[in-house]
Image (cartoon, helix red, strand yellow):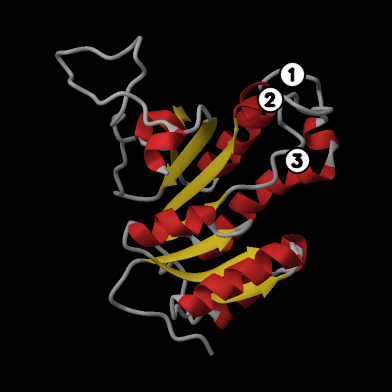
């Protein structure tokens, strides 16, 4: 049975990909107990990096729809409410502005709702979901624009979570990419959360009073 570290807050990563979000979560002080990812090449990358850094993260290579949250919670030696953070960036192809934009008519679009499915069982203190900007106007089954976003917020709130969301630009936080992503943060109980203020600004938006540095370029980062 998995033995979780007790000195760090505990996180579970869904739709882990090659582990990009997990790097940020670990840098924020969390212990990532497990990563769920079905792509074999991503899992190979995860295993390599976890081994190289001597981490004890469990890699679960499977379709998330095959996983029973209660079984996984037991395997991780967790009890109800002991998970601090459930984090995931579900597949974006169904919502991306580049593509057919079939929304939840595409089975990949429905994977977004795996986040509340796991949350119902684990009852984590915080849920962090990342998705492309197109989620905000994705149509539901009734062709209502923005209906899918309303659905996911409602599902989280129906199981007792308070939700906040924001469209963030990566360049505003020191990443040399003009990439916008929707971040949904759902909190349980007395947990309070506010999105951090930008640490960088564009040339047009830079104001001497706030004295933020200009967006970093790829060349500067390299």
Name the quadrant containing residue 38. bottom right
| Residue lying farthest to the top in this orientation | 204
Viewer-side residue, 80 vs 25: 25
Q: Which residue matches tag 3? A: 109
Task: Check disc 1 and report its element: helix, strand or loop.
Answer: loop
Q: Residues within 10 Å of mark 3 (few under 14, many from 20)?
A: many
Q: Which residue matches tag 2? A: 147
| Residue lying farthest to the bottom in this orientation | 1
Viewer-side residue, 3 vs 57: 57
Q: Which residue matches tag 1? A: 144
Q: What separation in Å lies between label 3 and label 1 (alpha carbons)?
A: 15 Å
Q: Is residue 4 left or right of residue 118?
A: left
Viewer-side residue, 52 vs 115: 52
Q: Residues within 10 Å of mark 2 (few under 14, many from 20)?
A: some
Q: What separation in Å lies between label 2 and label 1 (alpha carbons)?
A: 5 Å
x, y percent for residue 64: 72, 62
């Amino acid at each position: 049975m998995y033995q979780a570290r007790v000195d760090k807050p505990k996180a579970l990563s869904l739709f882990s990909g090659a582990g990009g979000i997990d790097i940020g979560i670990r840098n924020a002080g969390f212990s990532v107990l497990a990563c769920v990812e079905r792509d074999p090449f991503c899992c190979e990358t995860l295993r390599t990096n976890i081994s190289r850094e001597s981490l004890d993260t469990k890699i679960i290579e499977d379709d998330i729809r095959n996983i029973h949250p209660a079984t996984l919670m037991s395997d991780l030696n967790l009890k109800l409410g002991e998970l601090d953070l459930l984090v995931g960036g579900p597949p974006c192809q169904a919502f991306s502005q580049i593509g057919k934009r079939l929304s939840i008519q595409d089975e990949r679009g429905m994977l977004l709702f795996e986040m509340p499915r796991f949350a119902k069982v684990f009852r984590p203190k915080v849920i962090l979901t990342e998705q492309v900007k197109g989620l905000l106007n994705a149509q539901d089954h009734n062709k209502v624009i923005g209906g899918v976003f309303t659905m996911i917020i409602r599902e989280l709130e129906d199981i007792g979570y308070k939700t906040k969301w924001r469209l963030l630009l990566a360049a505003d936080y020191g990443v040399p990419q003009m990439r916008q992503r929707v971040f949904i943060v759902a909190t349980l109980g007395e947990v309070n959360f506010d999105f951090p203020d930008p640490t960088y600004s564009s040339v047009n938006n830079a104001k001497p009073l706030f004295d933020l540095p200009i967006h970093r370029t790829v060349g500067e980062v390299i």
